[in-house]
C-alpha cells in the first residue's frame, strides 16, 4: 500500500521511478486487508440492519437472506475496480512497474531475478505477514488466518477467534452480523487493548449485547482438529467451533531481502529502524509501512511513503509524526482514535481534563438508530491543548478526521468545540465532547 503512493509522489517531484512488485500492486491493503474486509462488512451490516432492525424502521423484512458467494463476488469486484485504478495511476505517473521478487544487492542495486535494477535512492516497502501462535498450524480450512478468512467464499456455522485487536473484532462483527456463533478469546484483560480503557469497556458491553461470547484474560495453550471442527485448549478449559481464526498480529517482511548486508539496522523484533524522514541506517535507503512497525495501517504507510519521496527529492515538507496517525477499526460499533489515551496522557505527566459525550444524547444518532458509544476528548488541563480523541460508535472512522486535524494544527479542545457543526449530524458528538472538556456541553 505504501509503495505506490511513494512512487507517485516521487514522480510528481520529477524523479524517475521504478516500482518492484512480486505479486499485485496495492499489496495487503487492497487484496487481503482493508478493502476486501470492508466490502464484506458493508454486506453484513446491510443484511443485519434490514433483517434484525428493518421492522423498527417500518420496513417489511420478513425473509431477508444472504448469499455469501455473491457477497464474495462483490468483494472481488470492489478490489478489481480499485486494482485497475492503481495500474492506471502507475501509467499516468510514468512509474515503471517491474514484476518480480526484489533483493538488495548493494545500496544502489536491487536484483529481480537475473535483472539488476540500479538507483541512487531506494525505498523498502515490503509490508508484513500474518503471525501465528506456536503449536497452532494454519491449514486454511479449519485453522485459518485473516488472509484465508478474507478470501473465503463461505462462512462457518461457528467460529473461535483468538485475538481481540482490530482484525479480531472486525471479523467478530462480520460473522456475528451474518448469524455465525462467535467466541472471541483475548489474552489481555480487555477487548481492543491498544485503545482507551473506556472504549474497551464500551466494546465489551456492545459485543455481549450483540451475542458475541467474549472471554478476556484467556491464555490459549493449543488447538487441534476435532469433531469436524477445532478444539481450542485454554487455561480455562476447552472451546470448540467449526473454525478457528488466529488474529494475533503481523510480523515484518524484512527477512531474506538483503537488508543486513547493505547495513540496514533492524529492531530486535525484525522491524526496520528509521528516523522521522523514513531514513534507515544505510545511506540512500528509506523504509516505510508495516515493515518499520509503529501503527500497521494503510494510511500510515501511504503517508510515510510521501514523506520518504519528498525527503529523497530534497523537498522536505513535514516529518512523519506517529502521534498524528488515526487508528480505525470497522467493527460494530466502530472505533477510532488519535493521539494519547487518558491513561497515556496522565502517564506522560499531563494534568488532564476529559470531555465525554454519549451518542444516546445526539439527535442524529437516534435518527440512525445507533446510540451505543461516545466521543471522548482528552486535553491538557493547563493549556487546553487537545492531546487525544477516542470515538466508539456510528461512523467513528469518519468522525476522527476532525480531531486529528485539530491535533495537526496543535489546536485546543475549545477550538474544536467552537467550530460550528452542521445539525443534525454525528459530528456534533465530537463538538459536544470537546465542549464538555470545559463543562460547556449543551446536550448533557
Ligand atoms: C485483514 C486486514 C485488514 C486490514 N484493514 C485495514 C484497514 O481497514 N485500514 C488500514 O489502514 N489498514 C488495514 N490493514 C493494514 C494494512 O493492510 C497495512 O497496514 C498496509 O497494507 C501496509 O502497507 P505496506 O505498503 O507496508 O505493505 P503491503 O500493503 O503489504 O505491501 C507490500 C508489498 O510488497 C510486496 N513485496 C514484499 N516483498 C517483496 C519483494 N522482496 N519483492 C517485491 N515485492 C515485494 C508485496 O507483494 C506487497 O504487495 C489491514 C490488514 C489486514 C491484514
Image (cartoon, rainbow, N blue to C red):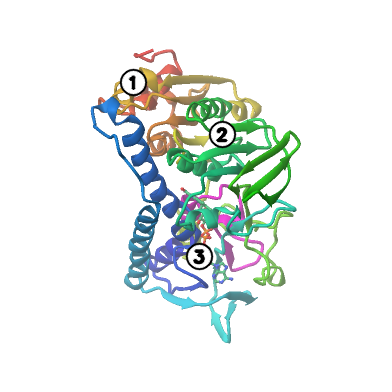
Q: Which residue is mark 2?
A: 195
Rendering coords of residue 332 (x, y %): 44, 35
Q: Nearer the viewer, residue 234 or 285?
A: 234
Task: State the residue at coordinates (35%, 41%).
Answer: 47
Label 3 residue SS? helix
Residue at the front extreme, as displayed = 227
> Which stretch is magenta?
279-303
The residue identified by callout 3 is 312
Does 301 appear in magenta? yes
Asked if ligand 1 lies within 8 A of label 2, the reply is no
Label 3, label 1: how far apart the Cα atoms are: 47 Å
Residue labelled with disc 1: 362
State which tag comes first along the sequence, 3 or 2.
2
Q: Is residue 346 visible?
A: yes
Whole-percent x and y of residue 162? 63, 43
Q: Earlier in the sequence, mark 3 or mark 1?
A: 3
Q: Nearer the viewer, residue 152 or 101?
A: 152
Is residue 242 positioned above or below 266 on the image? Answer: above
Q: Is residue 187 magenta?
A: no
Amino acid at each position: 500500500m505504501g509503495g505506490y503512493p511513494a512512487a507517485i509522489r516521487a514522480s510528481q517531484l520529477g524523479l524517475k521511478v521504478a516500482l518492484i512488485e512480486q505479486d499485485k500492486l496495492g499489496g495487503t491493503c487492497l487484496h487481503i486487508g482493508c478493502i476486501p474486509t470492508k466490502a464484506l462488512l458493508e454486506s453484513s451490516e446491510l443484511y443485519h440492519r434490514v433483517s434484525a432492525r428493518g421492522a423498527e424502521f417500518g420496513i417489511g423484512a420478513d425473509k431477508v437472506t444472504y448469499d455469501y458467494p455473491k457477497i464474495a463476488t462483490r468483494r472481488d469486484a470492489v478490489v478489481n475496480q480499485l486494482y485497475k485504478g492503481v495500474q492506471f495511476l502507475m501509467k499516468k505517473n510514468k512509474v515503471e512497474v517491474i514484476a518480480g521478487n526484489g533483493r538488495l544487492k548493494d545500496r544502489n542495486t536491487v536484483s529481480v531475478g537475473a535483472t539488476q535494477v540500479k538507483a541512487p535512492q531506494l525505498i523498502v516497502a515490503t509490508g508484513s505477514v500474518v503471525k501465528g501462535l506456536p503449536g497452532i498450524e494454519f491449514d486454511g480450512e479449519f485453522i485459518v488466518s485473516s488472509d484465508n478468512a478474507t478470501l473465503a467464499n463461505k462462512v462457518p456455522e461457528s467460529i473461535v477467534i483468538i485475538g481481540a485487536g482490530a482484525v479480531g473484532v472486525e471479523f467478530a462483527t462480520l460473522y456475528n452480523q451474518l448469524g455465525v456463533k462467535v467466541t472471541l478469546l483475548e489474552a489481555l484483560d480487555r477487548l481492543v487493548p491498544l485503545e482507551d480503557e473506556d472504549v474497551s469497556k464500551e466494546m465489551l458491553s456492545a459485543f455481549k449485547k450483540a451475542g458475541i461470547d467474549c472471554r478476556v484474560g484467556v491464555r490459549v495453550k493449543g488447538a487441534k482438529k476435532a469433531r469436524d471442527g477445532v478444539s481450542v485448549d485454554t487455561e480455562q478449559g476447552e472451546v470448540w467451533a467449526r473454525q478457528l481464526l488466529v488474529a494475533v498480529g503481523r510480523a515484518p517482511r524484512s527477512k531474506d531481502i538483503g537488508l543486513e548486508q547493505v547495513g540496514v539496522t533492524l529492531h530486535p523484533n525484525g522491524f526496520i529502524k528509521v528516523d522521522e524522514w523514513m531514513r534507515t541506517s544505510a545511506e540512500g535507503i528509506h523504509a516505510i509501512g508495516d515493515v518499520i512497525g509503529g501503527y500497521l495501517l494503510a494510511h500510515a504507510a501511504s503517508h510515510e511513503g510521501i514523506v520518504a519521496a519528498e525527503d529523497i527529492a530534497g523537498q522536505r515538507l513535514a516529518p512523519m509524526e506517529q502521534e498524528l496517525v488515526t487508528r480505525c477499526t470497522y467493527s460494530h460499533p466502530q472505533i477510532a482514535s488519535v493521539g494519547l489515551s487518558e491513561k497515556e496522557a496522565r502517564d506522560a505527566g499531563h494534568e488532564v481534563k476529559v470531555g465525554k459525550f454519549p451518542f444516546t444524547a445526539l439527535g442524529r444518532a437516534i435518527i440512525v438508530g445507533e446510540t451505543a458509544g461516545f466521543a471522548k476528548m482528552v486535553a491538557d488541563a493547563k493549556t487546553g491543548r487537545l492531546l487525544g480523541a477516542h470515538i466508539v460508535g456510528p461512523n467513528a472512522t469518519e468522525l476522527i478526521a476532525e480531531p486529528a486535524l485539530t491535533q495537526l494544527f496543535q489546536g485546543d479542545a475549545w477550538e474544536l468545540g467552537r467550530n460550528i457543526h452542521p445539525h443534525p449530524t454525528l459530528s456534533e458528538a465530537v463538538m459536544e465532547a470537546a465542549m464538555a472538556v470545559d463543562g460547556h456541553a449543551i446536550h448533557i
